[in-house]
Structure formats: C-alpha cells, structure tokens
Image (tube, coloured by chain):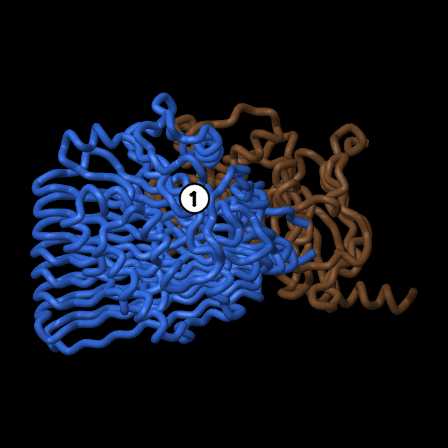
Amino acid sequence: MLKSETKLILEVCDLHANVEDQPILNGVNLQVYAGEIHAIMGRNGSGKSTLSKVIAGHPAYKITGGTIKFEDNNLLDLDPEERARLGVFLGFQYPIEIPGVSNLEFLRVSTNARREYEKKEELDTFEFEDFVQEKLKIVKMDPAFLNRSVNEGFSGGEKKRNEILQMALLEPKLAILDETDSGLDIDALRVVAAGVNKLATPNTATILITHYQRLLNEITPNYVHVMANGKILKTAGKELALQLEKSGYDWIEQISSNKEENQ
Amino acid sequence: MTGQNTVDKLVSKPYKYGFVTDIETEKIDKGINEDVIKLISRKKDEPEFLLEFRLRAYKQWLKMKEPNWADLKYPKINYQDIIYYAAPKKSEKKASLDDVDPKLLETFDKLGIPLSEQKRLSNVAVDAVFDSVSIATTYKEKLAEHGVVFCSISEAVVDYPELIKRYLGSVVPISDNYFAALNSAVFSDGSFVYIPKGINCPMELSSYFRINSGDTGQFERTLIIAEERSSVSYLEGCTAPMFDTNTLHAAVVELIALDDASIKYSTVQNWYAGNEEGVGGIYNFVTKRGHCRGKRSKISWSQVETGSAITWKYPSCILQGEKSVGEFYSVALTNNLQKADTGTKMIHIGAQTRSTIVSKGISAGKSSNSYRGLVQIGPQATGARNYSQCDSMLIGDQASANTYPYIRSQQPQSNVEHEASTCRISEDQLFYLQSRGINFEEAISMMVSGFCQDVFNQLPMEFAAEADKLLALKLEGSVG
C-alpha cells in the first residue's frame, strides 16, 4: 500500500549481462523506491559490483537481456555521463587516479554538468569554492586534497571520502555505493556512514553493496538482498544481514538450488 | 560500444584554417637549379654576398642525401616538382598597411591575427608571412623607439647587411643538414629580430606563417640576435589550407644570445595535417638552433606541435658560454596518420652549463610519435647538468610512441638525469570521469591538458590557453 504512494526510482527487470562473453548477471530483478536504503550482499564474484557498474554504464559489460528504468528513462539507452546527469551516482570500490587533473576542477566540472541538467545555476570558480567548503565538512576532509590530482596518491580512506564528497556535490537521486566500507578503519567508516546518512532524503534512494554487517550498523537498510550467480536469491529486512553474519551464505544458496531442482 | 572503440572513433574536427585565399599570385616555374636561385635573389634585390651564400648552399645540397634515420615514412619528395617562390602580386613595396592588399588583411583577420591598426593584438607585434613573402609587420615604429629591430629578413638584408653577414648561417651552417642546405639556397622570407644591449623587449614578438599555394614550398628563415643583457620573447604560429597534395616546409631558425641575454622562443604549429586517410598535409622539416654564445645566457624553446603530416624537428641549444642555460619544453600531438619525430639537442660546451628537457608526446589514431634527443657533455663542460623528462601518452590502441634518448658525456664531473614514462588513457579513467557527468571528449581533453601542464606553464600566458584549446580541438570529433 505504502509503495504505491511513493515514487519508483529504479526498476531492474530480468537483467542479463556479459563480460568478454562470460555471463555475469543472469536475470536480476530489483525495485528501489524513493526514501529507501537497500543493501546488496553476497560472495565475491556473485555479481554485486557488476550490477552497480552496469547501472552506471561501464562500457566493459554487454547487456544481453532485460531493462533498467530510472524514473521515466530507459537507462540502457544512455551514455554514462547522461545517467550521471540524471542523478545516478556510483561510489567506486576502487576510485580511479587521474594524474594531472586537478581534483577541484574535476569536482567543479562534474557538479556543473549535473546542475545544468537540474536547471540550476552554473557555479563559477569562487562560488564553487564556497559550495565545496560546506560539503567538505560532511566528510571531514582536508581542503588540501582539493588541490591535488584526482585521487592521485590518496590513501584508501581519503579516496572513499573523496567519493562521498562527490556524492554530496552531485546530490544524486540514486546513490550506489560499491563496497565503500572496504579498506576503512572504524573511524573512517563512521565518517563515511554519517555522510551517507546525512545525504539520504525522502526523495532519494541508496544502494549499499557490502560484505559486512559493520556498515549496516551505521546505516540501517530497509531491505537486504543476497546475490549469488548473478541473481538476487533472497530479499528480506535488515535482520537478514545479521543472519548472514552468523551463518554465512551457504544456507541461502542451498535453499535456492533445492528450489530450482524442485522446479 | 566499448571505450576502446569509442576512442577509435575520435576523428579530428574539420581543420578550421583550411581555406584558400583567392589572390593573384606571382609564381616562378617549378624546379630548382642555379638560374632559379639567381632569379629568387634578383626578385628580392639582394646584395651579391647573399647570392653567393645561396649558391654555395645549393652546391652543398646537391652533394647531400635526404636523411632517413628518423621514424618517418613518406613518399619520395620530387624537388623538381616544387615551386620555390610565390608572392601575392602588388606587394613588393609595403611602406604602410594601406598598401597591403585588403584580401590579405582579411585572410589574417580570419586566422585570428588582425593586422590593422585598430584591431591589433595589444602588446604583441606581428610579422605576417604569406607564402614566400612578409606582407606586414606591426608595431615596428614603437619597437624602434627602444632600438629593437623587428622586420622581415628580406628587409634586414637591405637595411642591416652587416648583421646578416655576420650572423646568418653562423648557428646553422649551410652544410648542416639536407633541409638546412636547401633552405639556405632558396629561403624566401622570414623574420629578423635584433635586441640591442641592455634592452628588455617591451612586447611579445610574433611571426605568423601562412602557406596559401598548394604547389609552393615554404622556406622561411628566422634570425634572432640578443645582445648583452637583453631579453626577448618570440612566438610563431603557422597554418595552411587543405590540399590533397603534400606541401614542403623547410625552415631554418637561428638564435644568438650574448652575455646575460635571454631568448624565449615559442611555437604553436598547426600546419594542415592531412585527412583521416593521411592524404595531403604539410611535410615539416625544420632546423632550429640556438647558440648561447655569452656567459649566463639563456635560450628556451617551447613548442606545441599539433599539425603537419610529417614533423622532423629538433630545436637545439649550443651551450658555449659559461653557466649558460638551455631549455626545451615540448608537446607533440599526433592523430590519424600523422608522424612526428621531434626532440632536441643540448650541446654542453662551457663549464657549469645547464639544460632542461621536458617532452610530452600524445599519440592518437594510427599516428606515430617519437622523441629523439641528444645530450652531449663536452670535455670542458665541468659541472654541467641536464635533466630530461620524456612522457608519452597513448590514446586508443593503434597509435605508437617511441623515445630515443642519446647521452654522450666526455666530462666525468657532470650530471645527467633522464626520466621517461608511457601511459595510456584507460577505459576506467574515462568511465570514472563520465560517471560524474563529464562527457567523453571533455574527459579526454581534461586528461590531455593535465598531462601537458608542465609545458603549458612555460608558454606566454595568452598562448597557453590557446594551446590548450587547440589540443582539445584536435582531439574533438564526431563520437559514436
């Protein structure tokens, strides 16, 4: 009942994708409504990261079936930059270093690209400096990182803060955070999680891809999905994550393969 | 559509300067021989000594062979199929700009180099060379107030024969190499700069070379002399129309810096590069050399090479004066089927001489881009130091980059450092930028300009931005 009143942001239907002719996604179905936080868990190689990259439009993956709808747009028809401008944001598991390109300039150009789509005013260098100072507080990041090359020589934690900073600047409708917690110590994890919580609004949605319960102690999901073999096998409330922490993934995969045999 | 394929689809934007000016041109017959050289000399009313210089060079040239050691493959050039002199008619006398054919002024306007009084670039004096002749030099009078001479080399031959006699061919001897010998025999025009003792040239000097005729070679000659404690910053730019035949451009540039003098020479080279299939374009064979003759003198070359089908160019410094300094900052971008073999020579002769080389090569399409450099430390060059950094960037998977550093040291008390790197713009880097809303072309251009920053910082301010734009334009295209 509640769902029909809130807005559907993302709808993934029977999504199949290959990389170098290897099937990685084998029929993913997922619906994400405004105001929701979803966690996707699963073993390494289950397809979690692939799903996030396919939604963002990484060119290495070939879509072999299914659809992805984002609000009223068919995402698969759009280039990665168009998806970003619509409000899809992917926080990278391993943020990429780009030598020679100033972080500040990069942040400004990307922020303005998104703002242009949103029909907001373009920020000039000075306005942007003020804007970015505000957002830096959310991730407690040292302004010195603005003057360096994008992610170059940043520690793992600094890279992740830079990702959340980008999320804060771009104000996405859908944020997909791919193992944002990996490689973070507990303090950094709290800072990042606090940033994510602060940025979550009733009009936006978040997908967390993670291996660990500890992130979900900081950010409470509405739904927890378990992926295996390129499919979502089970969906439940936040308690599922605790169960996984205790018992691992075997039991779910067991149930699912029994089901398939019975069919 | 993978990122790689998308990169491959990157095609040069149509060349913006490819138009031809429809103007009556006086041309001599094709081919080269002693009579042609005499004819050129006569047309320019040259003194006897210059004709002798030309004829000596011609005799040397006949004995020489076209060099083939560079990483450049191109069809054999038929030197008898080239016109060695072409000039717009009515332009012999150029007492004032009013006498210049309006079509020519219009041409330079279109190229973004306004010559007329009202629209001139402020604080940049321009010598405009069209095919074989200089058609106008701006701010001449203002410069003359400071004793600075800035004129075409043809005028200098008449007005300052002593300086020409003394310095022409003193840095690049007529027998230096095949193309320099050819240039010495048939050079048509170019710029001449003389900065007297103790004068810092009050404005940027600039030459703009425009090839207009398709079958005419351009052989310009530039000579810059900086007397003791003087300094000058000089910039050259070049464009040519699009023809489906190749045009030969063989220039010689000589710089002389005396005690405590400094010369900064910047080039933004944008000759027509040929089309995507490699048809047409300029063959650019250039000899540029600076002689730091005086103590503590300094010569700095900065170049942004984006055009030409073939580039063969090694701006060099002979560091003779004690504590003299040579610098070479280069960005060479090749796309489609362009081939560039470029670099520098730093010849350390004097004690405590220093040189810096920063070279950035960017290869896209199916192009090939080589850095070739020599650092030579002579036996007298105690305490000489060199630092070289050669970085290559590959865009796509069909381009190639090579680095050929040669180091010869005859002096144990010297220090030579060489660093080299090659990188490729990765699919992941592009995706990262794209996933933040930055479009593909802008992403590439951000990375390329980041890569070139060290060199752009060396360019005169007005031109750094222009160079940045030029690179972006070169890489921009119809994607997907």
**Residue at 32% from the left image edge and 27% from the top image edge:** B96
- Image quadrant assignment for residue B358: bottom left
Residue B227 visible? The answer is yes
Residue B158 located left or right of residue B382: right
Q: Secondary structure at mark 1?
A: strand
Q: x and y percent of residue B60 in the render?
A: 30, 71
| Quarter holding residue A222 | top right
* Chain of the residue on which disc 1 is drawn: B
- Viewer-closest of A114 and A194: A114
Residue A151 drawn above or below residue B411: above
- Compared with B292, B227 (above or below) is above
- Picture coordinates of residue A216 (x, y %)? 57, 48
Instruction: Judge from the rendering whether residue B144 lies leftward or rightward of residue B118; answer left or right.
Output: left
Q: Which of the 4 image quadrants contains residue B52?
A: bottom left
x then y, percent, for residue B176: 27, 68
Q: Position of residue B303 (x, y in %)?
A: 35, 52
Check the image and report above or below for B134 versus B313.
above
Query: What residue is shown at x 69% (from left), y 34% (from top)?
Result: A34
| Dot 1 alpha-carbon crowd within 10 angstroms: few under 14, some 14 to 19, many 20 or more | many
Query: Label 1: which residue?
Result: B87
Which image quadrant: the N terminus of chain B? bottom right
Q: Residue at x 57, y 57 (%)?
A: B245
Chain ID for blue: B
Marker count (numbered): 1
Is residue B57 toward the left or the right of residue B11 in the image?
left
- Image point 29% across, 63% down: which residue? B55
Residue, far right = A263
Q: Amino acid at mark 1?
A: Ala
Taking A138 as reference, is B329 left or right?
left
Q: Colour of chain A?
A: brown
Residue A243 visible? The answer is no
